[in-house]
Image (cartoon, rainbow, N blue to C red):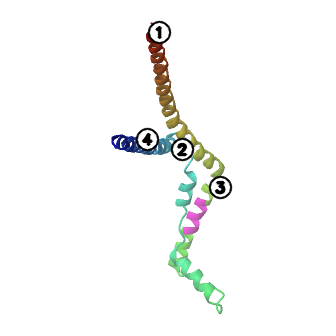
Amino acid sequence: MFKKNTLIRTIYLYTFSLVGLVLVVIGGVRFVDMGLKAWVFTRADEEQRMWQKQPPMPMVAEKRIEGAVQSTTSKEVVFTDEEKTAMQEWLASYANWKTQQEKFDPITSQRQREAAGALSFILVGLPLYFYHWRVIKREKSEEANGGEELGTSNRG
């Protein structure tokens, strides 16, 4: 009965230690990824910025366009002076956004985004791997040295 509780406790401790380690690694990877995108791969999020900068169409124009589409009798849409001003401002903003978008390279942005993700996994995973590998080698070495000493003391 006592061994069963010890086994359950051991399984519990190792399981939650593993879960904690996984959570720390995932969090570390995400933070490194974020830092790499902010300071190294600065164009990784350029595509998102570009779409957020797109000027919205004026509500007046949307209403007029919907009205023109629904109305089959009138083929000409007449704008007020305010609506014309709003449309001209929007057209200028849209033209500016369009020229910025033409300079944007989505392939470079995607590659930098992927590189930031991959490098963050490597930067977090390598030290973790090397540390644990070193601990395993040290324990195996201690086992081998301890076994030899026990063997020689039993001979004498």
Is 96 included in the stretch rendered in magenta? yes
- Could you classify mark 2 by the number of other residues whose Cα lies within 10 Å: few (under 14), some (14-19), or many (20 or more)? some
Q: Earlier in the sequence, mark 4 or mark 2?
A: 4
Could you tell me how far apart the alpha carbons at marks 4 and 2 are, in whole angstroms?
Answer: 29 Å
Q: Earlier in the sequence, mark 2 or mark 3?
A: 2
Q: Earlier in the sequence, mark 1 or mark 4?
A: 4
Viewer-side label of 2, 1: 1
Three-letter code, disc 4: Leu
In this view, 149 is above or below 67: above
Three-letter code, disc 2: Thr
Viewer-side label of 4, 3: 4
Disc 1 secondary structure class = helix
User: Is the C-beta separation of discs 1 and 4 under 8 Å?
Assistant: no
Q: Position of residue 5 (x, y in %)?
A: 35, 44
Viewer-side label of 2, 3: 2
- Could you classify mark 4 by the number of other residues whose Cα lies within 10 Å: few (under 14), some (14-19), or many (20 or more)? few
Task: Find disc 1 in the rendering and name its residue.
Answer: 155
Task: Find disc 3 in the rendering and name its residue.
Answer: 102
Viewer-side label of 1, 4: 1
Residue placed furthest toward the top: 156
- Could you classify mark 3 by the number of other residues whose Cα lies within 10 Å: few (under 14), some (14-19), or many (20 or more)? few
Task: Give the residue at x 59% y 80%.
Answer: 65
Number of numbered discs visible in the structure rendering: 4
Give the quarter of the figure containing the N terminus.
top left
Q: Which residues are magenta?
A: 90-97
Task: Find disc 4 in the rendering and name its residue.
Answer: 21
Task: Find disc 2 in the rendering and name its residue.
Answer: 42
Taking the image as shown, residue 72 lies to the left or right of residue 147, namely right
Could you tell me how far apart the alpha carbons at marks 1 and 4 are, in whole angstroms?
Answer: 44 Å
